[in-house]
Image (cartoon, helix red, strand yellow):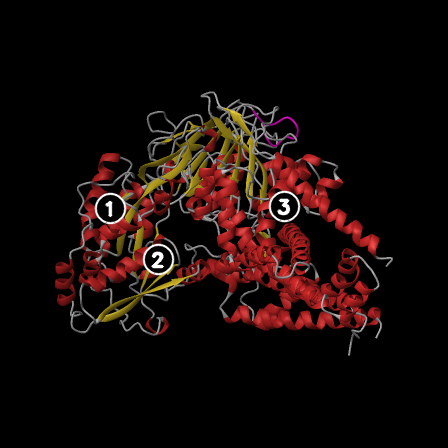
Amino acid sequence: MQIRDYIIRRLMVLPLLVVGVSIIVFALTRIGGSPIGIYLSHEMSQEEVAELEERFHLDDPVPVQYFYWASGVLRGDLGWSGVAAAPVTDVFLPKLAATMELAVSSAIVAVVLGIALGTFAGARRNRLPDHLTRVFSISGAAMPLFWFAILLLIVFWVYLGWFPIGRSDPDLWARIDHPTNLYTVDSLIAGDFGAFRDAVWHLTLPAVTLGYGATAIIARMMRSSLVEELQEDYVDAARAKGLPERLVLRRHARRNALIPTVTVIGLSFGFLLQGSVVAEIIFQWPGLGRWMADSVLRGDQATIMAYVLFTSVLFLVVNLAVDVAYAYLDRRVVLGE
Amino acid sequence: MNRSPRRGRWGAFLGIFLALAMIAAACSDGEGDDSTTTAGTPGTTAGTPDTTAGSSDTTAPPTTQAPSGGEVNNPGVFVHAADDEPTTLDPAQVEPGEGGETMILQVYERLLEIGTSGPEPVPSLATEVPTVENGLISADGLTYTFPIRQGVTFHDGSPLTADDVLFSWERVMTMDLPDGAASVLSDVVDSMQVVDDSTFEVTLQEPNAAFLNAVVPAMVSSIVSREAVEANGGVVAGEPNEFMSGSMVGTGPYSFVAWNRNENLQFEVYDGYWGTPANLDLRVEIGANPDIRVLGLRAGDYDTIETDPSFIGDIEGAEGVTIFAEGLTVEPIHIGFNLRIPVDQLPADDNIPADFFLDPRVRQAFNYAFDYDAFLRGALGGFGDFNPHYIPIGIFGYDPAAPVYNQQDLAKAEELFRAAGLWDTGFSVSVVTEEANLFETAALVLKDSIDDLGNPNMTVTVAAVAEAVFDEAHATDPVPYAMWVKNADPFADPHAYVDSYTHPDGEWGEIHGFRQGYVDPDGIADLIDRAKVELDPVARAALYAELQPLLYDDPLWIIAAQEGVVSARRDWVQGFVSNPLWPRPSLKFALMDKG
């Protein structure tokens, strides 16, 4: 099957999967009880509670509530977030952008360092650089994210004062337009290098924290794949025909070693999104993860539903992208069979 | 082969990106911003691009030399780290004790305000505090006249008139939102009128001793810009105004700039303020974990933080940090007895009958059993005090001579449980609380206290639940638990406390069925009702002094403690003043400066 046909087929199935996921999640959230609690204060009378239930259609049967919610989603209305005290749709996109900016930055750190370290170690198997890289990699995987984050926070924010927390200097943020809500991109569009530096400066600690954990996994996978590839006959053949070791590595072995590594990178994106919850809370990053954590703790079901819907779609799309990337890298893979 | 160059370009791009990040980091070691305005310069307008503190092309933490020779972080802007995100910024929608009140206090003003010290109201948008002597309160105590200050403008430029005052109060009562506090006004006000542009008159339903210090300065009584409201959705009965929920147009020293959800609220100095202007712009960082707030204070990025006594140990001795621990909040932490227990809705392990708390000896026994010292010295770190039933220390009517439960007396508790016939039969009862805060600790102390009695037949189970779950249970009538822990809402007048929390027909009196539990419900109701309309302070204080021993003998709550006011700030903060009668964290940032 052609890649294009495969993508179209998967995209056609996507809405059905999303609807199925949304029904399951909606039902599960309602099993935990009515979502009215987030809109209540402890001083409300029964009549006032009833008024609010009517305002949010929570006095209707659950299937009817789902209908209201689903039809609202189709109109772009994801409900009212009790935690953010605003419509979910008003808050969601800026927070999504913040999380994506952090996740992508972390992924860049993880991929660049992971592949570089993995290649470096794999090409020097069982020598000192390989051992040192292993120590570095395993440390990243072994250290709990929250602990590493707090460590960096205390050292680089509290004691050294080199890096801030939060997402931006509010004054610098305010002086540029935000067409994408991605601070780095917006600052470049605005041609404001000061704002760009501010964006990168604020990104550094959370991106390094998140990226380091994923770096370890990618580096280990890259190293072991490369070690295997370097033992293959085609590598011997390349060496035999006189190619320099640098080219053997770069043009032959590394490309093939990237195939399993790409799969790990795709999975790592999920790790980065999940890890962003911890990083966002600790570094005061105003993204979806922190909002979601507050929402779960306080029972803000409108926000939870929006988040689950989003992550479902995202994982389905990322999954698709990984499959396509896999086929692109390895022509032997036949999609759809 | 032909894809290699593209990979090379990507590699180069990524390399440049990382290099930029490292260069930015290397450059960010605190180089000063030459264009910064020295902290403390009045009228500084940080937040206005290119002219303000911290707004030039620097990514280093902006610092400036303070007059004293030290450095301050974030010059030109006062940064406070708050606990809660507001649920609304609309005075018509906010409820007492909610995070939005803190913001409303900074931006809106009222006819009268609670001053920097004490509970007495002081003039604000009204130029005088009405009294019978100055002729602004009628002889029958029903009509109050407020001379409205001239030359005041809202942040949208519109002038303040008596019509705005009428509009603001009518708006609250017309909207009458379930999530607001309209009843603060509607329960008291009979009619209102604009006498002329500078005179506003209110007639009450009955004389009310709490009107001037509890109703007029309440956040719900804030004066909003009629022009701004009418241009943005107007007033609809029963419907919140989305513009006003997320924005503010008041007359105060700060004007609203932005509310970045889950991140911060930003305010700037209002240049057209009629009174003493604020010194610095204001940013309120929202929702940081308490530990992060403490670290932020130590890092110098926050000038003040909201905290509770349990975090003081993390701050004590930190360089550049001052701890403020004076006075008491006016929100006693209480454990409620439900006298209308819905037995069929109780947790499965509870085995108490519906009339469990009707016997005053049982309620007294719980009061004697509670380990007050453990709660005060442990959870509150010693920052707090005990107050009698039920007027907090610092509020008019508090009687230091009134009897108070403040010592665990297990022998007395056992004696009372035996007398009530519960010692041999025992009981199992659950107490519901929000999880992971002081309330849960109070519940755990109660559980330990009952365990201290050494009777295995008597057990207390702590049901710690999420805030939303607690609020839902708390708003249910009857409450589906026999006991619960919370704190009182803050008020400036004793009537609000005794009416809400002790009156047999008051708010909680009805929900919990106090009338069927009190030995003399009519006597208690009579004292409370008489004190409400008694305008002579001496006679009124005498009524409260008579009431408090009755409430001690016939307790409807365990008052665990009155929490101390505790906050922490950087040493460079000047003009720090706190009044527990202001909404938490009891600070007016416009009064403060840095340097």
Amino acid type, residue under disc 2 in the picture: Glu
**Chain at tag 2:** B
Residue identifier under label 2: B440
Q: Nearer the viewer, mark 3 or mark 1?
A: 1
Among numbered discs 1 and 2, the one appearing first in the sequence: 1
Mark 3 and 1 residues: CB-CB less than 8 Å, in contact? no
- What is the CA distance from the residue labelled 3 to the residue labelled 1? 47 Å
Name the residue rendered at 35%, 52% in the picture. Answer: B438
Residue identifier under label 3: B233
- What is the CA distance from the residue labelled 2 to the residue labelled 3? 42 Å
Residue range of the region highlighted in magenta in the rendering: B44-52
Same chain for mark 3 and mark 1? The answer is: yes
Q: Nearer the viewer, mark 1 or mark 2?
A: 2
Amino acid type, residue under disc 1 in the picture: Phe
Element at badge 1? loop
User: Which is more toward the observer, B216 or B377?
Assistant: B377
Name the residue rendered at 75%, 41% in the picture. Answer: A189
Residue identifier under label 1: B386
In the image, taking residue A320 as reference, residue B268 lies left or right, namely left
Name the residue rendered at 44%, 40% in the picture. Answer: B305
Residue A75's place in the image compared with B427, above or below, is: above
Same chain for mark 1 and mark 2? The answer is: yes
Amino acid type, residue under disc 3 in the picture: Gly
